[in-house]
Amino acid sequence: MKRLGVNIDHVATLRNARGEKHPDPYTAAKFAIKSGANSITVHLREDRRHIKDKDLKIISSNKSITLNLEISANIKMVKIAVKNKPKYVCIVPENRKEITTEGGLNLRKNINKIKKVVSILNKRKIRTSLFINPNIEDVKITKKINANCVEFHTGKISNLVKEKKNYKEELKKIIKCCKYAESLGIEVHAGHGLDYKTTKILSKIKQIKEFNIGHFIIGESIFFGLKKTIKRLKKISS
Ligand code: PXP
């Protein structure tokens, strides 16, 4: 059974568009869990463009919500994570000008910084994950850094599938990396750009234990509701 993490950043995007309180990300988090989500993901960006500190505080204070906090490898963000004590932290690259997280971490360039961050979180028994592109070299570095999990960036395969292009090579690459990560004792997750079709394709990879999906769920919920969308994705992914 694979787990489904629901990313609610874009509930906050919608709320912030009006600068008021509705729709409330905390209500969405509770509702998503009730609808079958295994965890809730929020990305506290350095520019706070969607999730705010007060959202993180209220969501993390409800211990019946398994929270996966995404942060950049910045010591200020790590301090916030330690203070709020989420169960999981995923380290992601961050570029202020990007629309979304456009690729995985550059582990080779940032190895010392990321190693330090992971070590702080590991000491506090927070599950650590690194958001990386599917390549063997980065899986090897993840092992060196001592992170518990990898989350493979699935943006490339998602775009190929959506554009009806040949995605077989990218899929092969992902499968190879999943197998290699598992052989090193690293738990495998996948996320970015996933919808029903791409989730179905990737659900065949037995090494993937968790999907983290955001934009598609919130968008699809406009038509079919959060509950139906989560239930359908759970059925497809597990
Ligand atoms: N996983 C990680 C690490 C992310 O940073 C994001 C958001 O970019 C997602 C999953 C969810 O991506 P999406 O919103 O495209 O489903």
Image (tube, rainbow, N blue to C red):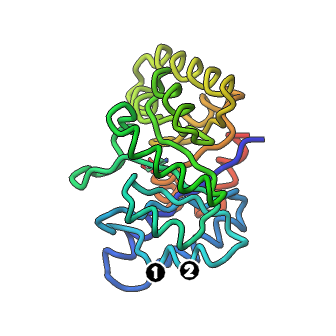
Kindly identify which residue carries mark 1: 54
Task: Give the secondary structure at mark 1.
Answer: helix
Residue 58: image location, x then y, percent? 56, 80
Task: Identify the amino acid type marked 2.
Answer: Ile
- On the image, the x and y values in percent for residue 194 come to 51, 41
Against 23, is 98 above or below? above
Q: Residue at x 64, y 61 (%)?
A: 87
Q: Which amino acid does the dot numbered 1 rest on?
A: Lys
Q: Rounded to the nearest whole Å, what is the CA distance between mark 1 and mark 2? A: 6 Å
Front-most of 98 and 138? 138
Residue sitting at 34 percent across and 75 percent down?
A: 16
Are circles 1 and 2 on residues that touch, CB within 8 Å? yes
The residue pinned by badge 2 equals: 58
Left or right: residue 150 compared with residue 13: right
> Which residue is at the far left?
97
Residue 23 versus residue 223: which sits nearer the camera? 23
Q: Nearer the viewer, residue 23 or 81?
A: 81
Residue extending farthest to the bottom is 20
Query: Which residue occupies 69% across, 31% down?
Result: 185
Where in the figure is residue 193, as x and y percent of width and height? Answer: 45, 42
Residue 155 in the image, given as x and y percentages of width and height: 42, 36
Q: Residues within 10 Å of mark 1 (few under 14, many from 20)?
A: few
Q: Is residue 165 above or below residue 40?
A: above
